[in-house]
Amino acid sequence: MGRFNQERAPIYEALEEFRRNRIVPFDVPGHKRGRGNPELIELLGQQCVSIDVNSMKPLDNLCHPVSVIREAEEMAAEAFGAAYAFLMVGGTTSSVQGMVLSVCKKGDKIILPRNVHRSVINALVLNGAIPIYVNPDMDSRLGIALGMKVSQVEKTIRENPDAVAVLVNNPTYYGICSDLRSIVKLAHAHGMKVLVDEAHGTHFYFGENMPVSAMEAGADMTSVSMHKSGGSLTQSSFLLTGPDMHPGYVRQIINLTQTTSASYLLLASLDISRRNLALRGREEFRKVTALAEYARGEINRIGGYYAYTPELINQDSIYDLDQTKLTVNTLGIGLAGIEVYDILRDEYDIQMELGDIANVLAYLSIGDRERDIERLISALVEIRRKYSRDNTGMFTQEYIEPRVAVSPQSAFYAEKESLPLAETEGRICSEFVMCYPPGIPILAPGEEITADILEYITYAKEKGCSMTGPEDADIERLNVLKEIVF
Amino acid sequence: MELWFSEPHTPNVKLSIRVDRQLYSGQSELQQIEVFESPEFGRFLVLDGYIMLTEKDEFIYHEMIAHVPMAVHPHVKKVLVIGAGDGGAVRELVRYPEIEQIDLVEIDEEVIKVCMDYLPSVSCEMRNEKVKIHIEDGLKYVRSKEDEYDLIIVDSTDPFGPGEGLFTKEFYGNCYKALKEDGIMVNQHESPFYETDATACMRAHKRIVESFPISRVYQAHIPTYPSGHWLFGFASKKYHPVHDLDAERWLARGLETKYYTPKLHEGAFCLPAYVEKLLRKVEVHG
């Protein structure tokens, strides 16, 4: 038993109390419990708009919490086994930026895998730190980047002893885990902090037989997307810290970019979701794992598809696998993942979490039903029957090693010019290009554009991947640094 | 004391039936199951608040879902019935001696038990030796079958709740695959009259048209279903529902029916103008 009774939800309770007291609002928000905007009530319901309120004494203040929010944060810290927990309302993007900005500054080196989320490199644009990429192993059959090998991290640390931190993606979007404990040990031995992008790993803290969580592995900071597998509202998240981080300093960093009007809908949803997982998480995630297990077995019996199974675990670049994830490689039926993703949505009314060049991913969570899984499996059977084709010439390679020429910040703010895609080879890109999802950069500001990269962009566009990042939304042109820079 | 069962047919219309007593009420893993006894309709089965069948008018539904395809297909040996835990469709099918096997797939075992206990006139053939009962999700059952059945009867509940999967494109496609090269699928097709039902009806028709080369719709009058005007789908790989109707052969069987006749069979495919228009809308692709 911890210090707290996890059955409590202090923010939620304070909101209930607040509602009972029928406070007269002469403060913002201006809709005043929805009265000024009846259409909002119609859309969201009275219950919802009446707790869309502003910070005030009985409800505490996220920028400087002293009462119910502070208590909710301490309770979350206990539930997650962290020294401190910050409630975040700007998505896990804000948590990731909070981590990066807390440990490095302009000119500092930070070691990270290339398959990081855009939010990490965005943070580097903000603070001017230099990315040192660890090449992740690629699995050419699966068409995805794997975890960070300890040996690769060690090599990178040796080559960059002045780096201040190591950032690990754990698990990746596809559920691949690195050997977090060893990486933490290694980094700490060299005086580096360890940050973890654990956006897809909330359930690691509550489920049984899950891969090790960042806090358990001894990481210094981690970003946990409570709204993904944890069940809270979209845009709510946690930033967790270990014992060697100063919570007061981290709070100052967060407050640099965080809203001063945090939504109580988001805060309360974090509070009650934390309560739910602390009390019932083990049972809930047992069901999710069983559902995923069942789906994997059925899908792998169809033929042509490959749903990732624990056999992939290799004690190194796939140190562990998140078994609640349902990632299905589709190359065996001659279709790109994104094509299956589109057919599922357009023809079968099934929305997947992501489709890339080689895979589709179903995000299973505490809200899934068996009968919906049956629909997905049956639709995959049909897609194979109706659409499968010869699979020669399918592109699988997705990782292209970046060549960092200048820091993301200098590239982003440098003098630049816009060129047609075909004329950009050999130039230095000043903007991002990525497939979204998963939002992992193909090009980041400051990187050289190569022939391989151009070929990949063209192929991904043809297959219908949603490409984002550049100023030119159609990605016919890219912004590159004016030659004068170097 | 007056006791009435009411079912909303739209937010603004409801059907009420005077009830003598409630015979059964229970919650299965999937749905609320109830059986009532009424002076006008006899016993009736209710799932999640919706009337599934009454003793008085179930013959219309079950005769129309079973005899229409049986009068068209010349040699039905193996039949798959999905849903239909009440046993009504099976009762009609076992009257055909050439049928060798009927696989009945019902997702909710409780429905079968309750119907066997309280609706014997409907479930009377469920223990017939030709009938094999599978307690399983119909969608799951059918996806592993290929080139196996002459006839598939989809006797589903409405397209919300546990029956949802039986109105999907993946389900109809898998049924196509499970049928032999001259197989027929008949399905409960909702009503064209009230807006919500009509939308479901159009969606189902669109999905079936995309999956089968021949796809026609026929109608029947069922007093206790919303609007009383109900549709069935006839989807087929080879046989046309009217041109391939062998009336003489069917009449020669000497089966006694209360609703179905080969003459009515032909007429049932003549639809009101507004229904034809509704269906045509989704028949053109794009």
Image: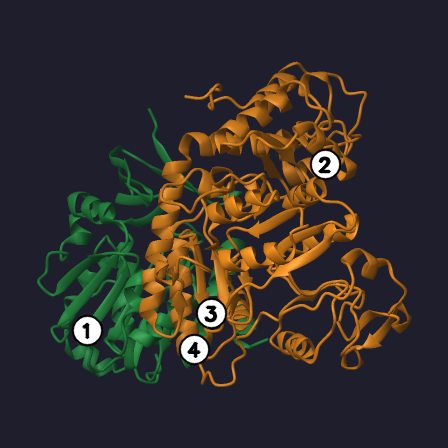
Chain colours: A orange, B green
* Number of other residues with Cα within 10 Å of mark 2, as a class: few under 14, some 14 to 19, many 20 or more: many
Q: Gap in Å between the C-alphas at discs 4 and 2?
A: 47 Å
State the residue position of label 1: B78
Q: Position of residue A348 (x, y in %)?
A: 48, 66
Gap in angstroms between the C-alphas marked 3 and 2: 37 Å
The quarter holding residue A265 reads top right
Residue at point 73% right, 28% down? A63
Circle 4 chain: A
Of label 3 and label 2, which has the lower sequence position?
Answer: 3
Tag 4: residue type?
A: Ile
Kindly identify which residue carries mark 3.
A142
Q: Amino acid at mark 2?
A: Ile
Q: Are marks 1 and 4 in contact (CB under 8 Å)?
A: no
Quadrant of residue B45 within the rendered picture:
top left
Secondary structure of the residue carrying numbered label 1: strand
Q: Quadrant of the N terminus of chain A?
A: top left
Residue drawn at (80%, 68%), measured in percent from left and top?
A472
Residue A333 disc label: 4
User: The disc labelled 3 sits on which kind of residue?
Assistant: Leu
Q: Nearer the viewer, residue A18 or A308?
A: A308
Number of numbered callouts drawn: 4
Q: In the rendered image, which quarter contains the C terminus of chain A?
A: bottom right
Q: Earlier in the sequence, mark 4 or mark 2?
A: 2
